[in-house]
Image (spheres, rainbow, N blue to C red):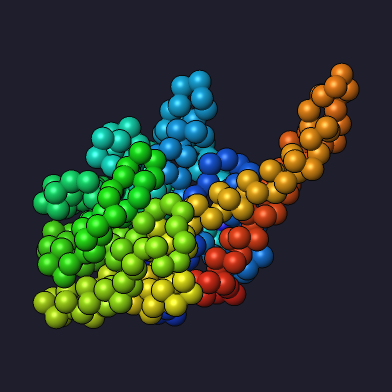
Amino acid sequence: MPIATPEVYNEMLDRAKAGKFAYPAINVTSSQTLHAALRGFAEAESDGIIQISTGGAEFLGGQHNKEMVIGATALAEFAHIVAAKYDITVALHTDHCPKDKLDGYVRPLLAISEERVKAGQNPLFQSHMWDGSAETLADNLSIGQELLERARAAKIILEVEITPTGGEEDGVSHEINDSLYTTVDDAIRTAEALGLGEKGRYLLAASFGNVHGVYKPGNVVLRPELLKELNEGVAAKFGKPSPFDFVFHGGSGSTAQEIATALENGVVKMNIDTDTQYAFTRPVADHMFKNYDGVLKVDGEVGSKKTYDPRTWGKLAEASMAARVTEACSNLRSTGTKIK
């Protein structure tokens, strides 16, 4: 059961919340980065989440027509086959999808899973993200209600982002300012609109100073203790303790203490992209620099097939990215927690 069933995915998230650990959610853009993520999870003996952003899906669809749904569907189908050789369980997820891309990405993918479920199969993806952070909260939650209803029918978990994450990812950008902190009122309005599980399960990407991209520790003011305030504020109003399953976005450069505090306060999923991108590319650059006269036919020579063969440097890239995924599992306390 390498790809989680809806029931197993729910169990994974419940175990993470109870055990105060989180699953690394690794963005992939190719079959090779998928294998790197699966390998990293397997070497850490951790279950995990594989995710595809709109830009990643477009890239996977090929540069001839850049079709997001085809790209995401193809890699998901590929994952269902190749993941069988890895002794861990993973969920497939689609990352940030803003309003103008819903009709070209999340809604068609929901339709595919709806048909699969009607036919007695499991959904193609186990969760989808709706990023309405650029909309008013009222519009954000209104669309969230529609998507949550469809997701529930397709046995899919919805992830929602109710307030902005700073920086830029796949063309969605927000300034780094005070709007990067979700308020208790924001959380209460979310619970009122989307419920607390009775309308369908959802993950909440609340903002506590998060910023996408590359930054050094100290350059961004993270307040992961804010997540406790959000849970307590909503619990006080609705009587349900620890009501939210939180997602940590924009975590590159976070300190070990910031991550630990986030885990203690309900984070069950942490997105990893920037760091794994660098881990994948770094050994490729090293190989190219060290083997310049082999990967290029310079000075009238013929180069060296062994050095420019994509398998040669591709293996190095996969191993490096897998090691970074394993490190992420350690940081998020998921090492050794795989479902037996």
Residue 149 seen in this snapshot: no
Q: Is residue 308 above or below residue 269?
A: above
Answer above or below: position of 256 versus 296.
below
Q: Number of callouts in the render?
A: 0
Res. 172 in view: yes
Q: Quadrant of residue 202?
A: bottom left
Task: Point out the image quarter for the N terminus.
Answer: bottom right
Of residues 103 and 214, the one drawn nearer to the viewer in this rendering: 214
Rendered residue at 79%/35% (across/down)? 292
User: x, y percentage for residue 60?
Assistant: 51, 34
Image position of 90 (left or right of 154): right
Image quarter (top left, top right, bottom left or bottom right) of the C terminus = bottom right
The residue located at (50%, 43%) in the rendering is: 76
Residue in view at x 36 percent, y 63 percent: 220
- Residue 33 image offset from top left, x and y in percent: 60, 47
Spot occupied by residue 107 in the image (x, y as percentages of width and height)? 30, 39
Residue 163: quadrant of the picture: bottom left
Q: Position of residue 257 (x, y in %)?
A: 44, 77
Depth check, front residue: 130 or 319: 319
Nearer to me, 211 or 49: 211
Residue shown at 13%/76% (left/top)?
A: 238
In the figure, 245 relative to 76: above or below?
A: below
The answer to whether 13 is drawn above or below residue 32 in the figure is below
